[in-house]
Structure formats: C-alpha cells, structure tokens
Amino acid sequence: MAKARKRSRFLATLLAVLLLGGALTAAFWPKPVLVDTGTVSRGPMMVTIDEEGRTRVAESYIVSTPVAGRLQRVEVEPGAPVVRGVTVVATMLPTNPAALDFRTREQALAAVQAAEASLRVARADLNAALANRDLAETELARARQLNAAQIESEAAFERVRQSARIAAANVETAEAAISLREADLANARAQLIGFEDRGAVATPGTDNSEVIPLYAPADGRILRIIQQSETTLPAGAPVMEIGDVEGALEVVVELISTDAVQVAIGDRVIIEDWGGNANLQGEVRRIDPFAITKYSALGVEEQRVPVTVALIGPADARRALGHGFRVGARIVIWQDENALRVPSSALFRSGQSWAVFVVKDGVAELRQIDIGRNNGIMAELRSGLNADEAVVLYPSTAIADGTRVAPRVVN
C-alpha cells in the first residue's frame, strides 16, 4: 500500500511539473509579429506632377480711354455679352477746361484785344489793296486802248499790266491775312473758356454731339469693370476687361523649375478639384522659358515656371468655370497601362539598393529589388519580385530577415 501510494504521488507531481512547464513554454514562446501586407500586382500606373493652377481667358482685351476726357458712369455689368464693334460698353465726353486764375484771365483778355487790333489792321490793309487794284485795273483798261491805237508803246503797256497783277495779288494777300487774324482771335478767345463757362463746354446729363462711344474690341463677355464711376481720365486709362470665357479658357500652373524640366508640350493634364462632378481634360500648350522668383508660405525662395494648359473637350462640361478660378492640375509625365507594381509603403533602403520584406510561409524574407518610376503610392517594379507575392507594408525595426510574421486582422 505504501509503495502504491508513493508511486501515485510521484505521478501526480510529474504531471503537475509537465503542466507547469507547458504553461511556461506557451507563455514565453515567441509570437509572430503582426504586420500589414500588400500584394505585387499588374495594372495601370501613372506618374503626375500635382500643383494648383488658375484659369484665365487666353486672349483678354483691356478697353482703355482713347483720349483724355470725362468717362460717363459705366452701365454694363460683369458677365454681360458683347459683340465686337457693335456693343457700346462706355461713353466719354471732352475734358472740361480748367478754371482760370486772375492773372491768366487778364493775360487771355490782353491776347484777345491784341488779336482784335491785328484783325482791324488786316482789314484796313485789305481796303487799301482793293483801292490800289481798282486804280490798276482802270489804268490797264486805258493802256490797252492806247496800245490798240498805237499811241502807247508795247513796253509801257506791259508795265501797266504788271502793276495790275501785283495789285490783285496784294488783295489776295490781304484777304489771307484777315483769315489768319480771325483764327488768332478765335484762339485767344478760346483761352478764356474756363470750367465755370457752362455754356461752352459739355455738361453731364446733356445731349452733346461730341460724345465719344467706346465699342467692344472683341466678342465675348465683360470679365471685370476696372473704372465704373464717372470721372476724368487721361488717355490710355483702363476701363474694363473683355474676353471669351466659353471658347478661350486656359489654365496657368506655376511649377517648381525642377518639375518643369520633366514636362513636355503635349503632355496630358487632369483638371480636378474645380467644383464640378467630373475631372476635366487638358493639354500642355506652352512652357515659359523664364522662371519667376517666388516665396513659399514658409518663406523659402523658389523658382517657378509658368506652364499654360489648354482645356480640351466640350465647353458645356466646364460652363461654370470663369476667369481667375482656382483648380487642381495633375500633369501626366509617365504612364503604363500594364506595369508591374509594388506598394511604395513597402520600400526601404538596404545599403545602396531598395528592398522589401516578402512574406513567405509566415516568415519575412529580405529581398533586394530594382524599381523605376514612383508616384508615392505605387512603384514600378523592374526586377526582384513576381506578381501576386505578398510584401510587408510599413516595415518596422522589429522585423528582420527570418522574422515570423502574421497578417494583422482588421475588424
């Protein structure tokens, strides 16, 4: 009995030790590292340069004042349609003269008096020239009779006829002098016209034949009114801007110079974030050869290159867009419809090469690979992996070659 009891106690102790050892082994046995996994796949891939842009009318026209004058209040509104050479978009009146001070007015009065005196002298000269012409014509008639009767010589007759011609020329000279003096008098009187002389100048609200109409220089719509209130403007002052929003709208994107050198004329452009339901399509039409120095929001100096993108496709799809709107532009610089792709989040540097951890039979295997284009989401795979292989995403320092891993289950 004692022997049987001793054997039973031994077996119970052994069983307890085995159970305890198994529990400790299970508790301290290394568990696989939970990881996120992705798959190497084939499919379409593109690399784009993303930047904000703004719309603008390809050919906008600034309506400006042709001469100095008083602009009447502009009655048209932005968005109104206009027809080239037909629609009157604004009107002008001649500039009112400035008010005269006392000294200037006295000088102008003296000039008028001098012009009137010169006119009287010219008229007196005309009377004297008329009297000399009449006398010369009478002498010429008498000399002609005497010459016909051969009483007076031919030489004497020629001298009389010459004197008659000179007298007639003097009359014409005197008449021309009167016209000149009358013009001088009108000019002197015009110097007396001041701003307060309402009867001699155009006044607002009155019908005046000297109104200058400003016609639309192109078909389209009024984009903005630069000067709407009635005011006096010099020649060449801008009044409004006109352009064809429906048919000549384009996008200007300012790229960093290092990105601009990768863009070529004819590259496809995807216009997004413009407010519409669908993306718009565009095409690079011009890359400016001159970079502009600008500063970022952080104060970093950047060299920006303006790139012009022409919108293609039906105009109805972008009817809501106008001049100066903000849009998002994605310029496609590379595209492949059947590229072998690996998630960019799986890549890390291993020495001088790129590498990934391939999940194979629950074990992470370090694999060096060769990649091409990378758009930040997917990378073009040239060699090192095959399609449908699983790779570890966002590999941490807890993973090394040969580490047991398990996919993380997302509830």
Image: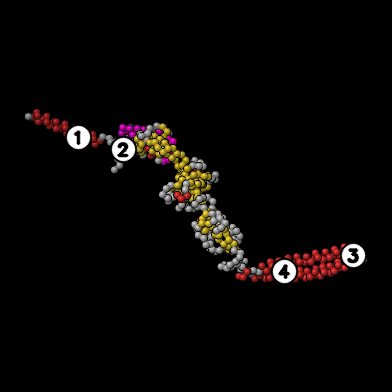
Helix or strand or loop: what does disc 1 sit on?
helix
Q: Which residues are magenta?
A: 359-376
Residue 77: in magenta span: no
Foreground tag (4 vs 1): 4
Tell me if 207 is positioned left or right of 155 in this view. left
Q: Which residue position is annotated with label 4?
A: 115
Three-letter code for the amino acid on which mark 3 is drawn: Ala
Neighbour tally class for label 3: few under 14, some 14-19, many 20 plus, Cα within 10 Å: few
Helix or strand or loop: what does disc 4 sit on?
helix
**Which of the two discs, 2 and 3, labels the residue nearer the N terminus?**
3
Q: Which residue position is annotated with label 3?
A: 148
Give the spatial CA distance, label 3 vs label 4.
Answer: 49 Å
Query: Residue 35: percent from the left, percent from the top?
Result: 32, 38
**Nearer the observer, 279 or 297:** 279
**Nearer the observer, 367 or 96:** 96
Give the spatial CA distance, label 3 vs label 1.
Answer: 170 Å
Tell me if 236 is positioned left or right of 157 in this view. left
Q: Residue at x 90, y 66 (%)?
A: 146
Q: Which residue position is annotated with label 1?
A: 20
Q: Which residue position is annotated with label 2?
A: 407
Q: Which mark is residue 32?
A: none
Give the spatial CA distance, label 2 vs label 4.
Answer: 108 Å
Seen in the picture, residue 397 relative to 117 is either above or below; the reply is above
Helix or strand or loop: what does disc 2 sit on?
strand
Neighbour tally class for label 1: few under 14, some 14-19, many 20 plus, Cα within 10 Å: few
Q: Residue at x 59, y 63 (%)?
A: 211
Give the spatial CA distance, label 2 vs label 3.
Answer: 141 Å
Circles 3 and 4 in contact, beta carbons < 8 Å: no
Query: Residue 194: percent from the left, percent from the top?
Result: 63, 69
Three-letter code for the amino acid on which mark 2 is drawn: Pro
